[in-house]
Image (tube, grey):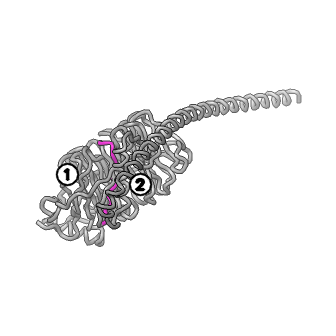
Amino acid sequence: MASPLEDPILIRPFHGHTAAVTGVAFNANAAGLVTCSVDRLLILWNLSTQCRAYRFEGHAEAVTSVDYSPDGQVLASASHDHTVRLWIPCIHGESSVLKGHTASVRSVSFSHDGYSVVSASNDKLIKVWSVCHQRLLFTLFQHTGWVRCAKFSPDGRLIASCGEDKSVLIWDTRDKICVNSFSDYEGFSTFVDFNPSGTCIASAGSNNTVKLWDIRTNKLLQHFKVHRAGVNCLSFHPSGNYLITASTDGTLKILDLLGERLIYTLHGHKGPVLCVAFSKCGEKFASGGMDTQVLLWKTNFDTLDYEEVLRHNFRRTHIDDPPHLLDIYPRSSHLHDENLNSIEVDPNFDVPDKHTPDPVIINIRPVSCTCSTATKAAESSNHVSIFKGAGRSEEPSVSSSARSSKRKAENESESAVDNVEQHAGISSLSRVLDRIVGQLHMLTLTISVLEQRLTCTEDKLKECIEDQQKMLRQKATNKT
């Protein structure tokens, strides 16, 4: 049962995580893919011919979300350990910890200029951070329940957020206020994102639905109910014509937004699908789920003209006469239920070769990690040499290495002692810096309270001056 050339196909699965995969993101040129998992790890997959993968450690609890900066130079991750981390994707595992949330952080996302990241947390707060200065810029608060997701608009002027209080809020990043809200009384939204033009938002619902809202007219444009379980994630195709959704029912669905219909149902995961994302150019997309798998797909249908895709898929899913034009392009929004026909894509039948071996995964330990023995130091140096030495010539002969083995052992022991001393100094310095950061945070809060009090005092003084001026005017009029 070969799949036609315009249908999406599974390129290959990736195995490396030991628990549910909770987030996926492509870099700018789709040559790299980063994933995060409940196993507390990030894995950076190199999708080039010489495929390698690098596993990053750092979070103390499950990682819930991950995102690439637009230029691909920085990674951001969120975790149940209440922190956001900014990573430089290199062999040193360098990362900066952003502390401020008091509960699990559920979502993290870069602005389109890469200067800021927004995080959403179970503490009911949304925080915006500076990437360059690695500090908190401001906090948004109006949600009354856990905030599940927050995303920047393409121009960076707005933020869309959703939470378990059954609301979707639109925020103005300049005035730092909520400017619009959409309520969903059937269930709460688990994920929200802007379309590429920034005129609409799509929300994924715990009640199996996907909704599209026009933020200019504040109207519900489309309402899809094509899944049989909660929808966990969604992603817009860069063209804005298609939307892909991931659900607890174990499937991915591709929706045609112009035709307002379901066109593809993708199988492959063995259990709930938790995350999905298109690449920046739209030629690939990736998904992750409870089965610990990461599936890399090729889009295919986006290379054809939209009208051609529409006609071809319509012939394959309908045997009756085509409906009236208004039935295909209705003038008002309406519910699209799960009984709609779609083209089924199952990798068990459509992919001839899915047994390609998984890439070699190299562990990248964080800089702050201490190594207590010479063996660990040697292992760490081996990982670095593997990363740097790809494609180089082989090591010298066994005889030359045997002559220098004693010298190497002495150097390794000395370097291990030096590393322990350096890491001890770094850890003590990091503790001092954490205390300083905490004190600065308290000082910032104190200053904000004082600013509020000064503002109130100024307002009262203005009122008093105005009252005095009124009294003087009344006296002047009475004398005349």
- Amino acid found under the numbered disc labelled 1: His
Label number found at residue 269 = 1
Could you tell me how far apart the alpha carbons at marks 2 and 1 are, in whole angstroms? 28 Å
Looking at marks 2 and 1 on the same chain, the residue that comes earlier in the sequence is marked by 2
Residue 219 versus residue 424: which sits nearer the camera?
A: 424
Kind of residue at disc 2: Pro
Per the rendering, the mark at residue 89 is: 2
Residue 272 place in picture, x, y as percent: 22, 46
Is residue 368 magenta-colored?
no
Residue 228 drawn above or below residue 315: above
Q: Quadrant of residue 7?
A: bottom left
Q: Residue furthest right?
A: 480
Q: Bounds of the magenta span?
A: 38-48
Task: State the SS at label 2.
Answer: loop
Q: Is residue 332 visible?
A: no
Residue found at the far front of this picture: 403
Please tell me which residue lies in front, 88 or 427: 427
Asked whether the viewer can see residue 30, the reply is yes
Comparing 338 with 480, the one in front is 338
Q: Position of residue 343 (x, y in %)?
A: 18, 61
Q: Is residue 313 above or below residue 58?
A: below
- Circle 1 SS class: loop
- Horizontal and vertical percent for residue 434? 51, 35
Report whether 389 appears left or right of 300.
right
Label 1 environment density (alpha carbons within 10 Å; few <14, some 14–19, many ≥20): many
Q: Residue at x 19, y 61 (%)?
A: 356
Q: Nearer the viewer, mark 2 or mark 1?
A: 2
Looking at the image, which is closer to me, 365 or 456?
365
Q: Which mark is residue 19?
A: none
Q: Quadrant of the N terminus?
A: bottom left
- Residue at point 73%, 30% (across, down): 461
